[in-house]
Image: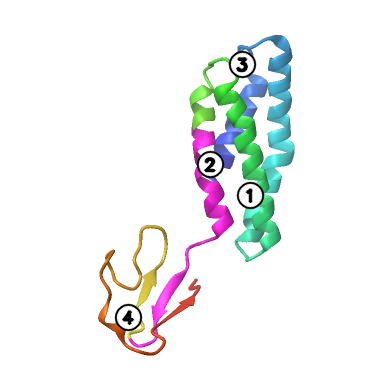
Amino acid sequence: MGAAILTAIASVAGMVVPGLYRDRDALVRLTQADDVFRLAIVLPILAIGLSTAAHGSINGRLAALGALATLAYLHAFLVFGAALSAATLAHIAILGVVTWRMPQTTLGRPVRLSSRRTGRAFDAGPGRYPVGGEPGKMSPTATQPGPVVDAVIVS
């Protein structure tokens, strides 16, 4: 949601601050039209998509992914194709956050694993090792026969 807030601030600034974009007149008008598009179309789709994806909707996840990809495309032009301006750092930040968020939106939230025998929960998010605790090490229960770990989403 941080990318959405920063996008809204940068888009409003692009529309109301004169001289913020320092390109030819045609490109300035095009970029300001993109600002309106981001505010009126992309950000509402992103908000609705993230809201419904939080409740398990695949369509919401796809809508959010599409909105994030659109933001990445539009901000990539502002970072790599437009003249440097006072908003360039904001556009770089937005591009970075959006690019980082796309795989997370695709994969969904991390799964929590719980052991039937101990009742302990382990996070299976990125960089975590739910069974062995450390890379290359196996827990004693992982070598015992029978189902040890169930993948369940815990709220």
Overall secondary structure of the magenta stretch? helix
Secondary structure beneath dot 4 equals helix
Mark 1 or mark 3, whichever is nearer to me = 1
Q: Amino acid at mark 4?
A: Ala
Please name the residue that numbered disc 3 is placed on.
21
The CA span between labels 1 and 2 is: 10 Å
Could you tell me if the residues under marks 4 and 2 are in contact, i.e. CB atoms within 8 Å?
Answer: no
Tag in front: 3 or 2: 2
13 left or right, relative to 89: right
Front position among marks 1 and 4: 4
Q: Earlier in the sequence, mark 4 or mark 3?
A: 3
Between disc 1 and disc 4, whose residue precedes? Answer: 1
Distance from Cα at disc 1 to Cα at disc 4? 36 Å
The residue tagged 1 is 65
> Mark 4 highlights which residue?
142
User: Is residue 77 part of the magenta span, yes or no?
Assistant: no
For disc 2, the neighbor class at 10 Å (few under 14, some 14 to 19, many from 20) is: some
Residue ID for mark 2: 99
Give the percent coordinates (x, y) of residue 52. 66, 60
